Amino acid sequence: MDALKARLFEANAIGMAIAVLDWDQQCNMPHGGGAARAEHVGVLSKLAHESVVSDETQRALEAAEREVDPNTVDGACVRLTRRGLDMETKLPGDFVAEKARASAQAHETWVKARTADDFEAFRPTMEKMVEIARQEAEYLGYKDHIYDALTDKYEEGATKKFWDGMFDQIRQPLTDLVAEIGKKPAPNDAFLTGNWDEAKQREFSLKLMEAIGFDMERGRLDVAAHPFCTNFSVGDVRLTTRFQEFLPTSIFGTLHEAGHGMYEQGSPMEWDRLPVAGGVSLGFHESQSRTWENIVGRSKAFWKFFYPQLQQTLTQFQSISMDDFYRSVNKVEPSLIRVEADELTYNLHILIRFELECEMLEGTLAVKDLPAAWNEKYEKYLGITPPNDKDGCMQDVHWSAALMGYFPTYSMGNILSYQIWSELEKSVGDTNALMEKGEFKPILDWLIDNMYQHGQRFQPQVLLQKLCGGGLDAQPYLNGMTKKYSEIYGL
């Protein structure tokens, strides 16, 4: 086991060097550095791959498998290493390096093309990334559908069939609720858009992060074109946000990424640099970002405490009542941008991406036809048509990195957030009373004790069983949505 850990620490060091370069590319690097950065990450990715699949790692892993109790933390490290190794050994080193180079180059192309609203400039790159995703799926192998090979990387055991079943649970109830809300007068949220002082937005964002429990001694906040959370150790977790004319972008984007960050900070320090540290899956990770963004951050109790502070920071809000603000940040309205979508319509944005990914991977949708297909699905599911590709099929960063199979975990996170919250309330009690007083520690402590501190020790479905006593269940989410929005809209 000691020999295996030495190999894991080496691979981790290379992986974290790549992560630092990626963070720097998205936060600080000038566009002119793109070509060289692509070569850097290509070389390092191949080194990390070779370290993992080396004969030394194979021998150490086989010996450790005979040596450790599978029910211990070391046993979990062995299981996770075996899962990772089985995937890595199916991927040729040259392919790993090429994918890393192509992704780094594609990110720069995406940023420029999106800024210019020029899909044709991005199309050759997108075609290449889809082909890379197809190649990876073929290397990894699958039984039923090409999507299965890719989505299992992000949510262990998930398949296209699993995601189809999940969407079947929520599609009609959400569509019906959105239609019912659409008959009611919509809140006027015009006051949320303005020329906000960026320094004051940052000041307020930092205040929120620290109040809910993000440890600034082990983290920081920067700006990126597409907000994300990354970490280089349990003691170094980086968040990014963006400041725009629509104020909720920074407020709720920051809370969202802080949820990811606190999950990462919750692993025991002694697990640092081992595969057992960190969030157990992307679905679970997203459940925490959505918990802190939506269940906590969009609650009336939260704003009863923080709204006076927002009014002090941005004096434009002194003439706006807290109730009007609360209703406006919970406005349900079909919109173009996924990351700014309300809780109800958000899953429809994910469904669109899921269907398009499957079609592109199957080859039934050519990349050249993606803008038209995207617009058609937005009209079908949301009743709106994007006026351009910048706010249409080029709005997300994921496809520029060949991240296909990733999007459905966002909807899983929405469902899990309410499922886990319903268990939390049984122990913590009146969460609204706590939040009205700005007391978030009991909430975070429960999450750390019952979820965060377990890292990846248990497989996702085992952890869900421990937390909630069963598998994925959409009913708490649907109940939460119905209750909240019935009160807001007087249904």
Image: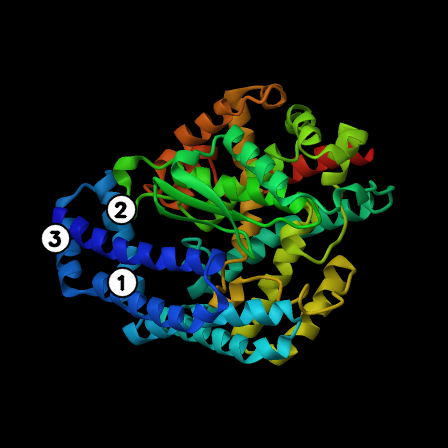
Q: Residue at x 47, y 66 (%)?
A: 401
**Relative to the observer, which residue lies in front, 376 or 180?**
376
Name the residue nearer the viewer: 207 or 93.
207
Q: Is residue 88 visible?
A: yes
Instruction: Note whether residue 464 is visible.
Output: no
As drawn, the label of residue 48 is: 1
The amino acid type of the residue labelled 2 equals Leu
Residue 76: percent from left, percent from top: 27, 44
Residue behind mark 3: 63
In the picture shown, does residue 105 fall above or below 306? below
Q: Marks 3 and 2: CB-CB under 8 Å?
A: no
Distance in Å between CA atoms under marks 1 and 2: 14 Å
First of labels 1, 2 by sequence position: 1
Give the residue displayed 71% in from the left and 30% down from the top: 311
Q: Secondary structure at mark 1?
A: helix
Instruction: Report whether 33 appears left or right of 224.
Output: left
118 w.r.t. 13: above or below: below
Q: CA distance from mark 3 to mark 1?
A: 21 Å
Neighbour tally class for label 2: few under 14, some 14-19, many 20 plus, Cα within 10 Å: many
Quickly name the residue at label 2: 274
